[in-house]
Image (tube, rainbow, N blue to C red):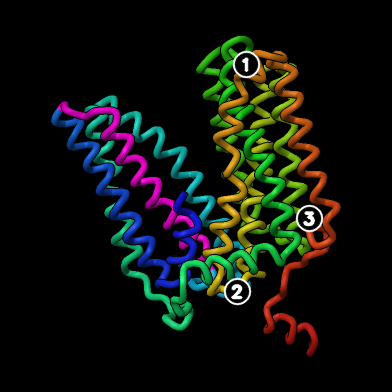
Amino acid sequence: MFLLVGGIWADRLPRHQVMVVSNLVSGACQAAVAVLLFAGVAEVWEIAVLAAVRGAAIAFFFPASGGIVPQTVPESLLQQANAALRLSRNATVIVGGALAGLVVAATSPATGIAVDAATFFVAAGFLGAMHLPASLRMEATSFRADLAEGWQEFSSRTWLWAIVLQFSVLAAVEFGATSVLGPAVAAESLHGAAGWGLVLAAEAAGLVAGGLLMLHLRPRRMLLAATLGMLLTVPLLFGLAVPLTLAAVCALALVSGVGMEIFGVLWDTTMQQEIPQDRLSRVYSYDAFGSWAFVPLGLAVAGPISEAVGTTAALVGAGLLSLGSTLAVLFVRDVRELRRREPVAAVALEATG
């Protein structure tokens, strides 16, 4: 609900300050949950309200974090910066999950939430030490005018809205299929929760491998390579539909993770190259809003569809929808032909050489 608002404020204010406030609010919400749990008086509605507030804070953090990268590194290093950021994020998810389990097992859920709250405050301290050029702040006008300006930047680029439209289908289908139907398949054919844990671990390893790959691989046609990367996520759905052996499904999950990371790094790099910096956070907010808007619907209908037509048919249908939506964007000329812009210094050096 707050993504579009978050994009406007991330363009109006120094982005690191938006991120600091977002982290402080998130940390305060988690600290309040921890206090309720320690006191033994927590109610579900209280935790739900605090979770909603934290979700609103994240809606401000995301567009600001995407827009801040071009302000911190030169254009020639954008891809490496995006790859490093995503690599650290994915590695943290893997390590963080294990550490969280150890903390909760050794202490209590309340302590785990309290530690989580502390990490937000530490992050806010790091972000607060950043210094960004004040000249990149846009002049505040009206909310409607700012929103319209962001929409103009978004809608005027065919490659941008076409891929966001693709993801509105792909994200809903793949999240529904893997999050709802994947565990059901694992329970029947892949050694249950332990087997599904291995599948998720393989996908996470693929994300890390993809990040390492994108530190060095620099395709000229970034969107073409990104879209081909997303094709690597489709075989996992068909593998679950069969289902293949646990080892084979893990291998497909690994490949899927690599493909997702190739797309993510190249997508961020393209956005940061093509969108003016003073409007980048608003465009990121439109991107996120469109890409994830139907994910709740995908999660809600995956189970009923599976019960109506069978899990195998539902997964095959999900695979075909993902494949079709991804292949469709290859008909967009800009997706096939948009190229990496070489830094001015490199171009001049090549011309004189």
- Type of amino acid at the residue the image marks with label 2: Pro
Give yes or no for contact between labels 2 and 1 (Cβ–Cβ under 8 Å): no
What mark, if any, has residue 185 been given in the picture? Answer: 1
* Residue shown at the point (63%, 11%) measured from the top left: 189
State the mark number for residue 224.
3
Q: Is residue 309 visible?
A: yes
Q: Secondary structure at mark 2?
A: loop
Q: Amino acid at mark 1?
A: Val
**Where does the magenta region start and end?**
40-69
Observer-nearest residue: 96 or 337? 337
* Sequence-first tag of 3 and 1: 1
Q: Looking at numbered disc 3 in the image, what kind of residue is underneath it?
A: Leu
How much space separates mark 3 and mark 1, taking CA atoms? 33 Å
State left or right for residue 23 relative to residue 162: left
Residue 73 visible within the image: no
Q: Which mark is residue 276?
A: 2
Q: Is residue 300 above or below residue 220?
A: above
Q: Is residue 185 above or below residue 221?
A: above
| Residue 75 lies in the magenta-colored region | no
